[in-house]
Amino acid sequence: MATVIAAAMGGVYALTAEAAVTCAPSVFKRQMFANTSFSGTPLTTDCDSAIDQDWGTDAPAPGLPDDRFGVRWSVTRDFGSGGPFTLTVSGRGGGVRVYLDGHLRIDLRGDAPTPFATPGGSAGASPAGSAGGSAGGSPLATAVPATVPVSVSVSVSESVDVTVPPGRHTLRVDYVHRRGAAEVAFTAVPLSLAGTVTPPPR
């Protein structure tokens, strides 16, 4: 039987990985993996009203390792009449990728000493803002083999402007933590409001 725990604040509902999780409209489904390749069954699945996490050096959930874990957020939301939106993401202790309808829009390698590797072995990924990336692209985990030392204090951030067609579209944010303090934040706001919204910390 699935265990449901309602947090006192923040609108976060934690469920066991086996539970079928349905989140409210515009609320992210969050999956936590005990690896950096997002493989296998998520250790936990819950609903997250906002991506703004600072886990420090602790594991974000019981059963997850302190280092080398992955967190994936996804939501299908109504963008109304569409138009230009600003996507802003920041991270620490690893890398972050942002997808819109399966297309890679932001690709931050974080403290990786080399670019992301493609399945064919060549370095690099589709540049931010291009439609060449896809949800089936190379995992963030390929960026840093376990034998490669990484920095524990590098923070990264990026903002891109994208034109979103009217209607419903899917956002996905993949965060891979490798070592040190774990932080990640993401916002998607109309371009006209981007200057009035405080971006995630750098």
Image (cartoon, rainbow, N blue to C red):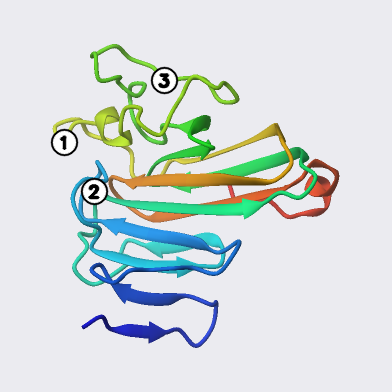
Q: Can residue 28 be spotted in the picture?
A: yes
178, 49: nearer the viewer = 49
Relative to residue 12, is residue 5 depicted above or below? below
Q: Amino acid at mark 3?
A: Ala
Q: Which residue is mark 3?
A: 125
Horizontal side of residue 190 vs 124, given as left or right: right
Q: Is residue 181 left or right of residue 36?
A: right
Given the image, on which type of amino acid does mark 2 rest?
Arg
Relative image position of residue 97 (x, y in whole percent): 46, 37
Tell me whether circle 2 and circle 1 mark residues in contact (CB < 8 Å): yes
Q: Tag 1 or tag 2, which sits nearer the N-term? A: 2
Residue indicated by mark 2 = 68
- Percent x, y of residue 129: 60, 25
Image position, residue 150 (x, y; %)? 28, 36
As helix, strand or loop, the secondary structure at mark 1 comes to loop
Question: Disc 1 designates what residue?
Answer: 146
Give me the C-alpha separation between circle 1 and circle 3: 20 Å
Q: Residue at x 37, y 55 (%)?
A: 181
Cα distance between the residues tagged 2 and 3:
21 Å
Q: Residues within 10 Å of mark 1 (few under 14, many from 20)?
A: few
At x 48%, y 45%, the residue is: 172
Sequence-first tag of 1 and 3: 3
Instruction: Please name which of the two marks, 2 or 3, marks the residue nearer to the observer.
Output: 3
